[in-house]
Image: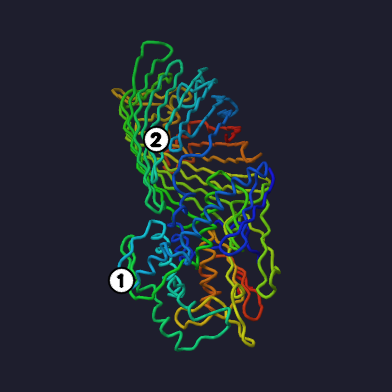
Amino acid sequence: MQIFRIPFEAMASTCEVVLCADDEGTAQALAQTAIDEVKRVEHKYSRYRTDSIVSRINRAAGGEWVECDEETAALCTYADSLFQNSSGLFDITSGVLRQAWDFRRAVVPSEETLAPLLALIGWHRVERRDRNIRLPDAGMEIDFGGFGKEYAADRAADALAGQGLKHGYVNLAGDMRILGPKPDDQPWMIGIQDPRRHGGLMATIPVASGALATSGDYERFFEIGERRYCHVFNPRTGQPVTHWRSVSVLAPRAIVAGSCSTIAMLKQAEGKAFLEEAGMDYLAVDHQGNFHQRGDDAH
Amino acid sequence: MQLKTDATTPASQSALGLALLTAAMALPGADTAQAESAPERGLISLKYLDYQDSQRGRDRISVRAPSLMIMTPLAEVWSVSGTYTVDSVSGASPAYHSQQLTKMEDLRRAVDLGMTRYFSQGSLTVGANYSHESDYLSRGASLQGSISSESKNTTLNLGIGVSDDQITPSYGGIHETKKGTDFAIGLTQVITQQDIAQVNLGYSHGLGYFSDPYKLADERPRVRNHTTVLARWNHHFLRTEGTSHVSYRYYRDSWDIKAHTLTSDYAQPLPQGWTLTPLVRLHTQSAASFYLPTDPATAPGPTFPAFGATTYSEDQRLSAFGAVTLGIKVAKQLTPDWQVDLKLERYEQRAGWSLSGEGDRGLEPFSARSIQFGISRLF
């Protein structure tokens, strides 16, 4: 048995499947099921495809009910639970803010630009009945970008586990789900991106199982003077969050790790209390560059 | 403060963390790990048991029992299993109380077969068993079903079993039968990511020959009904990665025996695939209503049943006693497929340890030790 790393491109980033097999051909074939699953999720929930279920729901906003398949309905239910457990901060209808925040032009939108978009945000107003969904106002949008990548990582890892694999992991641009430790039962050493040094690592942590996901202010951002404007927005103000440079969370599943790290970013200074309450291990860097870990306030 | 390397469970439990995990577990595919599904691989295991019991320096019964178990998945949603055991029993057994040890020897062969069908939210198992020794033939059949809630957090188990035994003692003249019907209902509940609780209720109705044909004065009622309540709690410790299993069992039967059994073990995984599991079991029971205790007037001879009595027994197993079992199991995962384990147990039984206070002090202390070696392989 040997460890193979199979890189692939998906979700606009470099991803990899790491697994153990007797030879490269077998490794490739095994990894392909995981890669196919990532591509399936990416394709199905793409905002850029007009025939996707997300596009159909968004096009019908203010009009008809749209019937979803089971997977989409389940993701909506999951989104609902995130909304409830984050006091409404994690809101999958907040994607409309992208219309105001253009990271290429690096311009801070005016209150007048944001106001009509903020009026379109509000998951609690989305109507759902069994597997049917209806967005009440024309122009309202949902998207699963907030946890789609982590969901894909879980699904890909499940596909590998379904083939009996017990060692390896799926890494979708830093969000990863571990199948199990290395063949010698040692944990994988997972590097965490330094939020201020592109391509650099700020920490390497051993992970043998479960999942690790990171949210940060470094993925898409622009800076004006000292102020950094990142792509994680408060759905009530329409403004980017500023308290955390990055939050990495360890959880049983990638989707939970990813959701917790994003909610912590959204909660700003209260993010730490949220992570402590959620009971997950985490490594966070605040806006001054200070490190925070689970339970460190107790010392 | 270290991040823990195993993130399959949260670092600590909380309502918020549980709410988020529960939400994630409702996603498609997420339940694959917990769903009751047909095993993906077969298992073959060989066990060898060496048991010896004794009283004050004298060995009583010894048992050497090799057994072979094979379980294999079939066509994705089925599994079949079979166990073959040979018990060779030899030694000496008291004719009454703990007196007059009488030599005996027997060979018992037993076959257990089971077939399980797995469904998305449950499973159904049919089982059959057959055992044979020179003076005893037993046949049984069982049906067991389980059904889980959508979240798989709650599982209901139902079972029914029937048995039909034939007793023909070696000295001839007796051809007796015994029939039994068992019912069981149980509920298993996942409470947190680290805790699982289970409650089982069992009822058994038996009709026929319950006496021991080799005892001096042994006439037991021809009906024996018993009820059991079993409560279990398994807890996973995040700090040590170990798991404790605590169970309490209450038993009472129509012969007036009431028993309480408390069992606790703790499995601690260690580096290099080792697992160490210490165990302790405490048991106390009251005597059967027709148990005849030793009589100081006639001891060490037997006690004579009262004139006109129709049921009586001087079997030590029907007396009131308390018992302590201490055990330890060492298991080693050799490769992902091979595992070996060794289990040692020591059992001490005393009349004076019965909490019922009615222990028969004329009985000898009784003890036993067992050693079991097992090796298993996934295929």
Tell me which chain the residue with mark 1 is part of: A
**Secondary element at tag 1:** loop
Q: Is residue B87 left or right of residue B130?
A: right
Residue extending furthest front? A50
Q: Above or below — where is B3 with respect to A240?
A: above
Q: Above or below — where is B168 with respect to A89?
A: above
Residue occupied by mark 2: B125
Q: Could you tell me which residue is drawn at 49 percent across and 21 percent down?
A: B109
Q: Is residue B371 visible?
A: no
Circle 2/circle 1 CB separation < 8 Å: no
Q: Could you tell me which residue is drawn at 50 percent across and 32 percent down?
A: B71
Q: Is residue B23 visible?
A: yes
Q: Position of residue B257 (x, y in %)?
A: 37, 37
| Mark 2 to mark 1 CA distance (whole Å) | 51 Å
Q: Position of residue A187 (x, y in %)?
A: 66, 54
**Secondary element at tag 2:** strand
Residue extending furthest top? B172
Q: Position of residue B300 (x, y in %)?
A: 48, 24
Residue occupied by mark 1: A63
- The label on residue B184 is none
Query: Three-letter amino acid code at disc 2?
Result: Thr
- How crowded pointer 1 is (Cα within 10 Å; few <14, some 14-19, many 20+) is rated as some
